[in-house]
Amino acid sequence: MGMVGAIVITKWTFNLLKQTSPILLDENIDSHYREAIHNELAPLANVADLHIWRVSGHHYAAAITLVSKADISLGEYKQILSKFDKIEHLTLEVHSA
């Protein structure tokens, strides 16, 4: 009976590590998704800094610094980025050119 318990606990441990290691190691989002965000912003601003990381199972946070080429407000940039539904927490910093 002790061996069965050890096998169950070992299996559970490996599954837990598999699920949590991307979060604990700050796994980044897919490069295509990151490029799509960059390409969406490029006509309007120079992307000075773009960081995206996983904060939970399917949720990501992003910190983006822009140097605006157009007269667009912070709210308008957030509206443009709202179509990227994987980003749950967005920190956006906009500087004028």
Image (cartoon, helix red, strand yellow):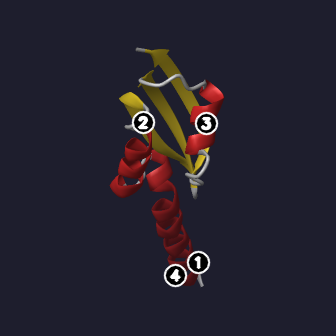
Tag 4–tag 1 contact (CB < 8 Å): yes
Residue type indicated by callout 2: His
Q: Which numbered disc covers residue 5?
A: 1
Report x, y in % for residue 48: 36, 25
Q: Amino acid at mark 3?
A: Lys
Residue type, mark 4 in image: Met
Observer able to see residue 86: yes
Camera-side residue: 68 or 25? 68
Mark 4 — residue?
3
* Above or below, comparing residue 48 to residue 18 in the picture: above
Query: Where residue 38 sits: x, y (%)?
Result: 39, 42
Residue closest to the eye, 79 or 32: 79
In contact (CB < 8 Å): disc 3 and disc 1 = no
Give the CA distance from mark 4 to mark 2: 45 Å
Dot 4 or dot 2: first in sequence order is 4
Name the residue that disc number 2 marks.
51
Q: Mark 3 — residue?
A: 78
